[in-house]
Amino acid sequence: MLCSSVHSKHKLFFHSICYRNPTSVAPKTYNTHHLSLREEQIEDRIAFLLHKCPNMKLLRQIHGNLLRNPFLSSSSPSFKFSMSKILCFCALSPSGDIEYARRLFDVIPQPNVFSWNSMIRGLHLFHNQSREPISLYKQMVLSGFANPNSFTIAFVLKACSNISAIAEGRQLHCHAYRYGLDSSPFVQTGLLNFYGKCEEIASARHVFDEISNKNLFAWSAMISGYARIGMVNEALSLFREMQEVGVSPDEVTMVSVISACAKAGALDLGRWVHAFVDRQGIRADFVLSTSLMDMYAKCGLIGKAKEVFDQMLERDTMAWSTMIVGFATHGLVSDALKLFSRMLESKVEPNHVTFLGVLSACSHSGLVSDGQRFWSTMNEFGISPLMEHYGCMVDLLCRAGLFEEAYSFISRMPVQPNAVIWRTLLMGCKKSGFHDKIEIIARNLLQLEPLNAENYVLLSNIYALNSQWDKVSYMRKKMKDSGIRVLPGCSSMEINGFVHDFIVGDDSHPEIKQIRVVLKDISRRVRLSGHLPWISSVLHDVDDEEKQNALCEHSERLAIAFGLLKTKAPTAIRVVKNLRFCSDCHEVTKIISREYEREIIVRDRIRFHKFVNGSCSCNDFW
DNA sequence: CTAGGGTTAG
């Protein structure tokens, strides 16, 4: 009884599809040919057809023929086999149809694990930012007919990673134990990757430590988890450990290791890793080459990045974009723009990141009209501007001192500006002196981001510049009352394969005593050179002497002092900072480069600053 | 039917 009603449900379903897609009615030849197939021939025939020429049109025909086949009962194994094959194709093939799969799935009375899995994975493949795979999994568990297996858990975990569904992922972790699947390597990697993507590094490490036979995938996933959140030392020591236990890294592992070096600005390590890749004969594909370029660019060796780029035999959009963005952060606008023209000549489609590179290159160099020209060509490439592109344009105009234009640009934006845009505009105010729009901008900014300390610091600095002391103290009070803490400045520097972190005012570094001696020497020589500290860079409510001390303990100063202590000329001192360069430190660093005859390269949150003999590559335009 | 990787405003 049940079977025949299911069969008729199938038939109804098929007719509704035919009705919706009249072109899909099977041609006569297929009909007659297939209607005569006997049950024992069906499975081979289906497998053959799906292997030979899979497309939805053919699939609908096969499906229809199966339903009309008088020799085939819907309860027969062949019928079920064929249906699951069809479901599999619709749900998983790029030329499939997930909606068709869903309706097919809905009429299967008691889908087996295989069908649930196909459907879950299919939903993820077709809608990779949706919760649908997770809801279907819940349905599966509730239905109680089929227990999830290692495939199921792995597929759902992947869906959770993509949308950072932390609670659901944790629950899956429990389910893995409940169903005894926690020892499956696929489940383990799935969990590792899930926790890594959600930046729950302690949980990831816990899973990792529990794995008794760690394979290449487990090592790679753990390294990538550390690399993602910038825990370079951990990523690199894991990379060493993995080799010690005899697991050979492949190109995927190397990409994570390289991107960890890129994040940390760890040039020596990055170079070593590059040599390792060459030595081991690891294949440099698009992704590996791009990560190498990015690493060199982020470590300050833009020429070396270009070398890797030139050696690539073929380049995709990301490779071109990475190189263009690299030139942009180094302030090499003409190189960036030339490369962009070459990219277009090579018929590689630019994407929104490419344009971010092009626009930010223009803005770093004050090329207003070029920037505007590129901005207007974006839609010719079918790229509609994102908030980031609007941000670039506001920055372009502000840096060039065109504050009014920037303000009117914002008022013409079709979307509401975000906090970054208002803050960029505010920094434009700071540069061009007091402006009657400050109050409006401040209100918009603080409404969008009332808890970001950076905003209060910026505003109070602007008010201080204009000697509006009542407003300065109001900003400080507001911050204090809301309990908002400033994100501490942090600078890092690599010495002998270890990345040292310095946090503003932090004295936990083991060599802090020697560092302070160097800092004192710096202060003395800087003072002798006639530099007066610009004390409004310091927010704290303290007297001038303390303000000067506070400036001297900015994280970049600690790192530079450490560099002077640990390295000798002509080695360049390379520092990576998490915030923007403080103006006073920028001046002081110029003086250090002259007085100590050292090349100092600082990557701040925005771009590179290369200090040589008293001047900086940014030409103070930042 | 399974897993790990690249560019992104200020």
Image: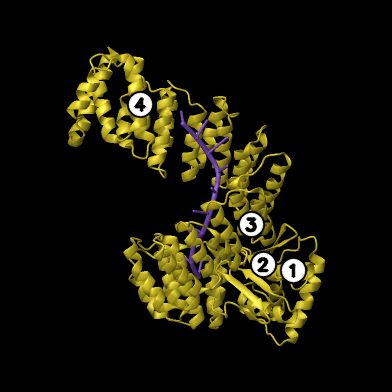
Chain colours: A yellow, B purple
What subunit carries mark 4?
A: A
In whole angstroms, how far apart are the C-alphas of marks 3 and 1? 18 Å
Q: Is residue A104 left or right of residue B5?
A: left
Give the amino acid type for the residue marked by disc 3 in the picture.
Cys
Point out residue A227 in the picture as x, y percentages from the top left corner: 61, 51
Residue at the disc numbered 3: A261
Q: Position of residue A567 (x, y in %)?
A: 77, 68
Residue at image coords 58%, 64%: A307
Alpha carbon separation for disc pair 1 and 2 = 9 Å
Which mark is on residue A48?
Answer: 4
* Crowding near the residue tagged with mark 1, few <14, some 14–19, many ≥20 C-alpha atoms within 10 Å: many
Q: Which residue is mark 1?
A: A563
Q: Residues within 10 Å of mark 2 (few under 14, many from 20)?
A: many
Q: Nearer the viewer, residue A433 or A540?
A: A433
Which badge, 3 or 2, comes first in the chain's sequence? 3
Q: Nearer the viewer, mark 2 or mark 4?
A: 4
- Please check whether the numbered discs 4 and 1 fall on a single chain: yes
Q: Quadrant of the N terminus of chain A?
A: top left
**In which image quadrant can residue A118 be found?**
top left
Q: Could one spot residue A486 in this view of the protein?
A: no
Looking at marks 4 and 1 on the same chain, the residue that comes earlier in the sequence is marked by 4
